[in-house]
Image (cartoon, helix red, strand yellow):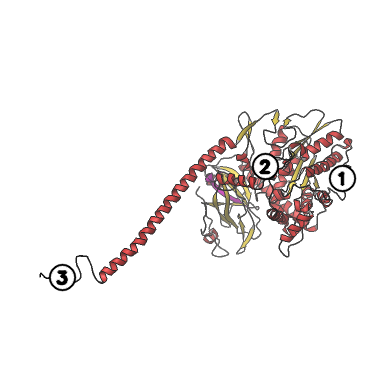
Amino acid sequence: MDPQPTRPTGPTGPTGPTGPAQDAAGAAGRARRPAGRARRIALSALLFLAATSAAIGVAELAFRAYERHFLVEEIALGSDDFDLTALKFNDHEGFLSARAQPDEFRVLSFGDSFAGAITTAPYTYAAVIQRTLDAADRERRVRVVNLGRGGTTFPDYLNEYRFWSSHVDHHAVLVNIYVGNDFDGTPPGVLAFATGKPYERGAESRTIRVGPGVDVPHVYPLRLIDHALAQYLTRRYAAAPTQARYRSKLGVANEPAYARAQTRTALMYRPTLLARYGDGLRALHPLLEALSADDQSDGRVLISVAPPHFIASEYWMRRVVEMERPGSDPIDPTLAGSVVAEYVRRSGLRARVVDLASCLRALERGGESVYYKTNSHWNVRGNEVVGKLLAEHMASQWLPDSGFVWSDRPPDCSLEPAPASERVADFVGDTLASVRSLEALEASAVAPLVNRSFGSARDLRSALEEIGLRHDPERLSGVLLGVGRQGWDKTARAVGWVRDGSRRAQPPLLLFFQRGKLDSARIAGPVADDRNRRLFSSRVGRSFRIENWQRLTWLFAVTRDGRFAQLAVGGPSRPGAPDPRAANRPKSATQPAPSRTATP
């Protein structure tokens, strides 16, 4: 029998390495297999994300094109007459001629959704005022034009007023203020001249953009999300009124959500939080100045202060108090009317202020409901009451011959705002002084730059020095960082800071330039102390919402005492990015770090 072949012994054999070497190779192979599988999973995930992103991008581009063509309408404004219905105003006549009739007394009514109303046009308080005064005054025709538009605030009222007051005859102006939207919702730090222009002047005509594409706000980077959220809220909280007295797609909130919303608005009625009125009063001031300078109205200006639901309703007041934090100071129902009336009085501007709070509260105590469920706006009865109250006041002040007196006026009803407390008077005085210093700064540093074009930052610095400002980059420095885009051409907000080496510095003015021209001017935000230096942070909501962020070329800061410096303009920030203050923090109290400057 032939001997069986023996397998070679030693370090090698027909099957490769043996012994410890073979074990090591097997272990390496087994380790490579999970690593390869992880790479394949990661690659698949990246391909999936890339394909999903591409699909979303294509869908977003297609939807934006659809929005531009089908959800936004450009309407030309005539020079002699205006189709208010086509312009989406809830006016009861729907048509306005530029020239008033000889026997016509015309009132222009401005405001947000309280003025626009959730009722159909015949039941708005503007229509009630007109019917009431028309019936009382047989010698003249009273026309109250409802120019209220939802989602607007003081800068928008100013733009609307400037347009309509210069294009149509009028004899008086009515402006309704809602604290929750006008003071609490005013963009912080924006100067009046820098607000958006709703009416664009073309070569031969004026146009305005209306439609769902304009009404749906730019909140998220994708317009698909904006419109999806709007559709959800419309359907989720649809009240579906059965009567024809309310507009379609009327929304209501569930009680917990409504209570939270009312609790947020309640912050405006706490005397210790008066500072929350500051930005709103600064935005209200140029509107008051424009109204006071109107020769046609000749001082016939009425400002009505609309209270939120919880101020009138004892039930919602209890709900708000239940949700407030322990130790919160009491709510003052008269605070809003008192602040507005005191500011108008101290400023010396021609306008009368009425506070609707006590009258609506009296009706609610009597068992009548003047707000629509959990919608926060007045129902038909609320609009009727407000219309009669305002008509009575107008008749006594502007049309004394009409002799109208509302016989069903509720008891304990007074339109007179409460006298200002010492705290309110001090706050209003300080705010007014700040507004006037800003006006002087705007006149000296901003007005000379409007409509001028600069080829470089050096040219701009020279222009600022020519108007008497002093270049001071050693004590004035800062950086502005954009944080994501919002909608088509807006930034969600800008995060940054401005450091002023002066001990008694006030918030500086920030000048934004796009393509060599001044685009807007903003007041820097809250103040913090940083090693005995004033740190003005712009971390305030959407205070720096800038059109066409990519075209922002230069950013300058100008102080109240006449100093200026160019600030840095950074790219989009991201989570985990280093705090720019750390990179620019002065090493000592006497030698501040040099400012970072953008490339001219």
Upstream in sequence: badge 3 or badge 2: 3
* Numbered circles on residues, count: 3
Find disc 2 in the rendering and name its residue.
249
Q: Is residue 575 magenta?
A: no
- The amino acid type found where label 3 is placed reads Thr
Q: Earlier in the sequence, mark 1 or mark 3?
A: 3
- Disc sitting over residue 545 in the figure: none
Query: Mark 1 is on which residue type?
Result: Arg
Q: CA distance from mark 1 to mark 3?
A: 119 Å
Quadrant of res 160:
top right
Mark 1, residue position: 409
**Does 422 sit above or below residue 236?**
below
Q: Position of residue 499 (x, y in %)?
A: 59, 57
**Percent from the top left, x then y, of residue 285?**
72, 46
| Residue nearer the viewer, 373 or 84 | 373
> Is label 1 or label 3 in front?
3
Mark number displayed over residue 6: 3
**For this view, does 224 lie left or right of residue 186?**
left
Query: Dot 2: within a 10 Å radius of its alpha carbon, few (fewer than 14), some, or many (20 or more) residues?
Result: some
In the rendered image, is residue 270 in sight?
A: no
- Whether residue 535 can be seen here: yes
Q: In front here: 296 or 209?
A: 209
